[in-house]
């Protein structure tokens, strides 16, 4: 996906194996079970691979050293490994790994090989060039859109604008007149447990397929789907917010504390549906043969797709071969395989390799989408300015429910992430976190940082409201409530210094702060905004991130910068809205991205420690919107509680 795992996972092996990264050939896994879980998602790749990959490298190194010692008839402690060779300490002779590998492979694999200490690392935590960058710069890297196999045909698919519609009639008379068009075929689109109908135009080029689709006339039956309107959905959620939700966790007695509080603060925060909008839209090739199926696709989980795809083509999993290529962005979207299933259905019917290409309009209008959410808060402050109660109610759709994973569950654990006591350990004596399930009539999926972005916006914006209601500095207020959480406190103390929080600003500038832990990583931003006539610009973002032991510092910074840009886009650009079941946004003219001239100065500081590594692909995103909204309030006095909002003031 571009988040650096193609470099960092082999780096873990290389460190313990004592080999130079430039001498390694890296291949994508093919979904074979022997490789274990191959999902790239949830910011979990490095965290999950940290010990297994290092142990693999260390075990292989010990076996190679033993093989060399046996050959030289010396003790193993008289040998050491370096740069792909084993050396004899006494006479400095050496044997390459290639010369030793056959004998080494016959030895027993050590169950608990000795791992290096941090002080001995040669590569981990150091500045290194990423091995995948040259091919991405010179154009030799293969992405989904680049895929081409012999005898391939192209397919572009017409979906119902209201997503769940059925095909009533197809008029393909004009489509079949387009030069290069070969066929028009009705298929389905697998979305969780539903199969909405769609129509594929098959051609000898992507251009011909797209022109053919433009000429296609499809009559849809989508009356039920057209009942959904996002404005009505938010009204429904606001009604649910007036009632008690299903409790996720509770401490003390919130209702009693609120009844005794001197000041009660109430607020509701809204975040819209969002499309993933990767720069490379969905594209893949599938070739279904009589007794096998080969797939070329930019997907996040080669092992995860095999079972699903085997059912579609009517084969055993071992008859499938997956070839994974680079993804031009994904953000969770390419862990959902509807576009691959469509290619498989068409290939099976046409008995030829089929390349399916989704257009930008398909990607933006068809989803699945980040859930739209409402976060309702109540806070209580006593006469001394202490926060005595914090009640956070989360209302919205459940991704797990659409997967069929909410049976007998009242709370979607994903939907309440990042704001529970573990990830937001503010020392408030009376707290409650609860959840209302409000299912929308559109498909939902994890979107970079999943619910942490929606929950974090409301949670950290409201913490700021509590600070102001208590008459306290927002930074010091947070630090005082995190006294028993040293890692959180340290992040904020470093941020306070690095952002020059206490400096006196001119009246046309202001700062805002937010801190959130997601995917095991603590990240905090200070956003500086400035007034330029009637416009407000985001001038600078200073970040402190604690992701445990750092594997690749450049990559941590790059991912955090990417998160800042994506978080800023979600905060001030367009969300997805639905009228009569149809997305009103369709391309970058009305689903806008942050442009390069709008990008703020970004300053990233990494906390050095010896903790286990945690994720960096997503944690930089959730604190951005609340930090920005808090800065906007500090500048204008206006509290923005609904995303996106316009930077005017």
Image (spheres, rainbow, N blue to C red):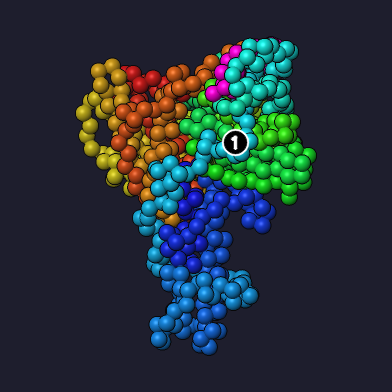
**Does residue 165 sit above or below 21 in this rendering?**
above
Q: Can residue 412 be seen from the camera position used here?
A: no
Q: Residue at x 62, y 34 (%)?
A: 152
Q: In x, y percent, where is residue 44?
A: 54, 48
User: Residue 178, position in %: x, y?
Assistant: 60, 16
> How many labels sit on residues?
1
Depth check: give the residue in front, 149 or 399.
Answer: 149
Q: Indicate yes or no whether the magenta region holds residue 427.
A: no
Residue at (55%, 43%) from the top-left corner? 325
Bin the neighbour count of mark 1 within 10 Å (Cα to Cα): few under 14, some 14-19, many 20 and up. many
Give the magenta range: 207-225
Residue 220, magenta (yes or no):
yes
Decide: is 336 above or below 178.
Answer: below
The residue labelled by disc 1 is 284
Residue at image point 62% right, 25% down: 203
**Looking at the image, which is closer to me, 29 or 395?**
29
């Amino acid at each position: 996906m571009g988040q650096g795992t193609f470099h960092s996972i082999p780096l873990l092996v290389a460190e313990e194996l004592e080999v130079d990264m430039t001498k390694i050939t890296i291949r994508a896994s093919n979904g074979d079970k022997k490789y274990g879980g191959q999902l790239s998602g949830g910011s979990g790749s490095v965290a999950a691979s940290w010990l297994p990959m290092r142990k693999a490298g260390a075990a292989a190194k010990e076996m190679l050293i033993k093989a060399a010692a046996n050959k030289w008839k010396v003790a193993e402690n008289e040998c050491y490994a370096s740069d792909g060779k084993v050396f004899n300490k006494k006479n400095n002779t050496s044997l390459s790994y290639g010369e030793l590998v056959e004998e080494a492979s016959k030895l027993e694999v050590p169950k608990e090989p000795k791992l290096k200490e941090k002080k001995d690392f040669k590569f981990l935590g150091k500045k290194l060039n990423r091995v995948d960058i040259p091919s991405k710069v010179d154009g030799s890297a293969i992405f989904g859109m680049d895929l081409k196999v012999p005898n391939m045909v192209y397919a572009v698919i017409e979906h119902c604008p209201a997503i769940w519609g059925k095909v009533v009639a197809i008029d393909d008379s004009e489509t079949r007149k387009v030069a290069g068009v070969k066929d028009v075929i009705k298929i389905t689109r697998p979305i969780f447990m539903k199969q909405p109908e769609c129509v594929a135009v098959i051609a000898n080029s992507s251009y011909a397929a797209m022109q053919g689709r433009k000429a296609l006339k499809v009559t849809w039956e989508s009356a039920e789907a057209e009942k959904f309107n996002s404005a009505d959905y938010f009204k429904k959620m606001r009604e649910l917010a007036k009632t008690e939700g299903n409790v996720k966790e509770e401490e003390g007695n919130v209702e009693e504390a609120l009844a005794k509080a001197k000041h009660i603060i109430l607020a509701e925060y809204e975040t819209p549906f969002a499309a993933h909008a990767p720069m490379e839209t969905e594209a893949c090739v599938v070739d279904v043969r009589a007794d096998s199926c080969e797939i070329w696709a930019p997907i996040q989980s080669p092992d995860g797709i095999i079972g699903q795809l085997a059912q579609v083509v009517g084969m055993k999993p071992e008859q499938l071969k997956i070839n994974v290529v680079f993804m031009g962005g994904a953000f969770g979207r390419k862990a959902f395989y509807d576009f691959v299933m469509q290619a498989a259905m068409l290939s099976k019917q046409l008995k030829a390799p089929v390349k399916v290409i989704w257009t930008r309009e398909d990607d933006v209008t068809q989803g699945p989408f980040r859930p739209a959410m409402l976060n309702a808060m109540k806070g209580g402050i006593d006469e001394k300015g202490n926060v005595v109660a914090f009640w956070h109610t989360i209302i919205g759709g459940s991704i797990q429910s659409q997967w069929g994973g909410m049976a007998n569950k009242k709370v979607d654990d994903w939907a309440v992430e990042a704001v529970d006591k573990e990830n937001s350990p503010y020392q408030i004596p009376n707290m409650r976190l609860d959840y209302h399930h409000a299912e929308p009539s559109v498909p939902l999926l994890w979107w970079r940082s999943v619910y942490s972005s929606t929950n974090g916006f409301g949670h950290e914006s409201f913490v700021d409201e509590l600070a102001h209601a208590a008459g306290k500095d927002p930074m010091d207020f947070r630090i005082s409530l995190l006294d028993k959480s040293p890692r959180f406190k340290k992040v904020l103390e470093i941020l306070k210094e690095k952002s020059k929080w206490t400096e006196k600003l001119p009246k046309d500038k202001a700062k805002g702060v937010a801190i959130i832990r997601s995917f095991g990583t603590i990240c905090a931003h200070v956003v500086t905004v400035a007034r330029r006539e009637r416009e407000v610009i985001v001038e600078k973002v200073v970040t402190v991130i604690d992701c445990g032991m750092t594997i690749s510092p450049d990559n941590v910074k790059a991912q955090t910068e990417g998160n800042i840009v994506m978080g800023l886009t979600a905060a001030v650009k367009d969300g997805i809205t639905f009228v009569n079941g149809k997305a009103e946004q369709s391309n970058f003219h009305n689903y806008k991205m942050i442009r390069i001239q709008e990008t703020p100065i970004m300053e990233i500081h990494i906390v050095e420690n010896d903790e286990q590594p945690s994720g960096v692909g997503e944690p930089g995103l959730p604190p951005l919107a609340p930090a920005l909204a808090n800065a906007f309030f500090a500048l204008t006095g206006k509290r923005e509680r609904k995303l996106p909002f316009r930077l005017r003031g």
